Amino acid sequence: MPTRVISKILSFRHHDRTATFAEQMPGRNTRLAAAKTAHERGALAGMSDAADRQNDRQVYGLAGAKE
């Protein structure tokens, strides 16, 4: 496969993963808002923060930039 085609395929994969993270964000926020205990809120907040960081890495990778 030519390099240009491989690069385009990888770009689509980055885009798809980034879109998936963006689609999941409202659900994470809803679960966080509905959390009953401080422990549950802390755990969900940590997972949400981790997902945000992962999404940032995907976006930076898609743009070809560094953090």
Image (cartoon, helix red, strand yellow):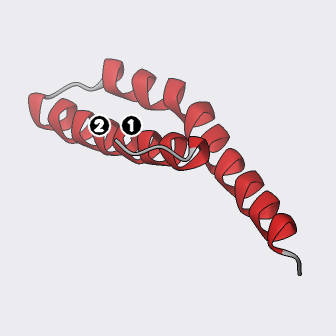
Disc 2 to disc 1, C-alpha distance: 5 Å
Q: Position of residue 48 (x, y in %)?
A: 34, 36
Q: Amino acid at mark 1?
A: Asp
Q: Nearer the viewer, residue 6 or 17?
A: 6
Horizontally, residue 19 falls left or right of residue 29, namely: right
Q: Quadrant of residue 15?
A: top right
Q: Amino acid at mark 2?
A: Asp
Q: Nearer the viewer, residue 42 or 64?
A: 64
Q: Position of residue 24 (x, y in %)?
A: 56, 36
Residue furthest toward the bottom? Answer: 1
Horizontally, residue 48 falls left or right of residue 43, namely: right
Q: Position of residue 44 (x, y in %)?
A: 27, 37
Residue carrying label 2: 49
Q: Which element is circle 1 on?
A: helix
Residue at x 39%, y 43% (from the top left corner): 51
For residue 65, the mark is: none
Cβ atoms under marks 2 and 1 closer than 8 Å: yes
Residue carrying label 1: 52
Residue at x 65%, y 52% (from the top left corner): 14
Q: Nearer the viewer, residue 67 or 54?
A: 67
Query: Considering only vertical position in the picture, is 54 above or below 35?
Result: below
